[in-house]
Amino acid sequence: MYTASKMNAHRGRGVFRALTGLALAAVTHTTVTQTAVAQTVHASAPARVLTGTALVAGQTMPVTLELARPGKDGAVRGSFVNGDERSPSSSGELHGTHLVLRFPEYARQLEGELTPAGFTGAFSGARIPSLPVTLRDSVPAKPRTVPTQAAPPAVLGDWEIAVKSPKGESAWSLHVLPAAHGGLKAFIQRVDGDTGFLYAAGPAGYDAASATYRLSRFSSAVPELFELRPLSDGTLHVTDLLHETQPWTARRPAEARRAALPPPTDPTQQTTMADPRQPLRFSAPTLAGERIANDDPRFKGKVVLVTIGGSWCPNCHDETPFLVDLYHAYHAQGLEIVDLSFEEGDELKDPERLRTFIAKYRIPYPVLLAGVPDDLNKVLPQANHLNCWPTTFFIGRDGLVKHIHAGFSGPSTGAAYTELKAETTAEVERLLAERPTARVP
């Protein structure tokens, strides 16, 4: 016997099959020689791939969405795609033509109408306004003859962007690499972390009409859209199209040194203790209401990492899996980790996003609700120039802060990510090997 929900689910699956048949054929059977391969595509392959745009801060930026086939009761999942990276939803439903995809790690969702013509709706949630999204089925472009034109200006390699940031920085790093399937990918490294990869599509990623490279990233995290304009003097104009109106100037590192410009900030020098002879004092509750403080007996004689974070912070999402691995590797030897999470006001009332954050990464150490982001320096007044999420304090067995690192270089940074993990691990091992001469009260 059919219930109403079963009938709706059946209709949803039927509509989805009707809507996706042509798109799936177009995606998996682009040439005769690919037919045999297409017949063996894994069952998890996307049933529908849609591309289009989102309107963010008055700017149009590209969006790619992969949709899986609906399951029971219309359940469906999708992923935003950037290059070879995917940002998957945790849940979603398709009932009739109404689609909802949820991304609880950032308390956001995509909602709208999925029809044979495509998708029309909005991406909305915490920390962003409602962003209109319009998508159509992605059909592989037919081969065409490209007119011969001059090679685009070379931008691959390392650059330094001269800035005056609110965090006191004078320069950021910009790293531009070739993308796997043509075009470019790049990331900007600041003292608090990196943007993740930004992608420019098309031949070499260059738009000859505007003489610019346009790089973007649309995921469940923060939308990013930058423009690179090569200039005749060998510099770049870099514009954050979603936040800035005036371009920054980027130079090759060697040229920046010749111009006597300061290098990017050393993240180990960003934050210091006002009095290194005093312990870092904190006290805040867990989600269960247990109050944990720096003088808790569990920390006595231990090496403790105190990380400043927030479930809204993309760089904190990058750092957390590494901290979890570090905890499992060294907890038995005397390592403790505490996350002081600064959440927005609505999250403090009902910290659902933080619960998702803890569950997603299976965090085994205490996560404390320390306040809202604006409370940071009030909660930890002993630290000078504390303004980066994340920031990690390394505390020795004597209870004193031995080392502070601002920000986190995520997986997109490649060598910097590998080096930071190695340096952090070495510092933890060094502190674990020490024995305190006295305990700070």
Image (tube, rainbow, N blue to C red):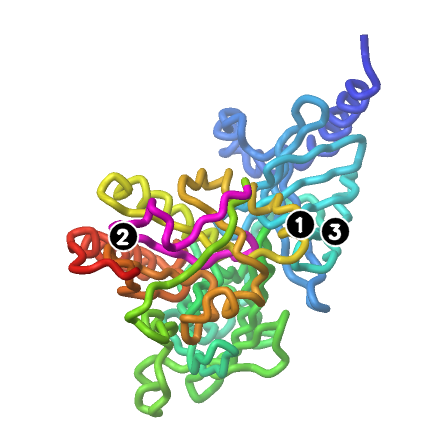
Which tag, 3 or 1, sits closer to the chain's start? 3
Quick one: quadrant of the C terminus? bottom left
* Residue 333 placement, left or right of 413: left
- Describe the element under mark 2 as helix, strand or loop: strand
Furthest residue to the top? 1
For disc 3, the marked residue is: 122
**Image coords of residue 318 (percent x, y):** 44, 52
> Which mark's residue is nearer the viewer, 3 or 1?
1
Res 382 label: none
**Image coords of residue 50 (percent x, y):** 66, 45
For disc 2, the marked residue is: 303
Callout 3 environment at 10 Å: few (<14), some (14 to 19), or many (20+)? many
Furthest residue to the front? 441
Which tag, 3 or 2, sits closer to the chain's start? 3
Name the residue rendered at 56%, 63% in the picture: 373
- Residue type at mark 2 is Val
Q: Quadrant of residue 431?
A: bottom left
Separation of residues labelled 3 and 2 (CA atoms): 46 Å
- Stretch in magenta: 289-313
For the residue pair 190 and 229, the one nearer the viewer reads as: 190
Callout 2 environment at 10 Å: few (<14), some (14 to 19), or many (20+)? many
Furthest residue to the bottom? 259
Callout 1 environment at 10 Å: few (<14), some (14 to 19), or many (20+)? few
For disc 1, the marked residue is: 349
Name the residue rendered at 46%, 87% in the picture: 232
- Describe the element under mark 3 as helix, strand or loop: strand
- Residue type at mark 3 is Ala
Which tag, 2 or 1, sits closer to the chain's start? 2
> Which mark's residue is nearer the viewer, 3 or 2?
2
Residue 331 drawn in magenta:
no
Res. 154 visible in picture:
no
Separation of residues labelled 2 and 1 (CA atoms): 32 Å
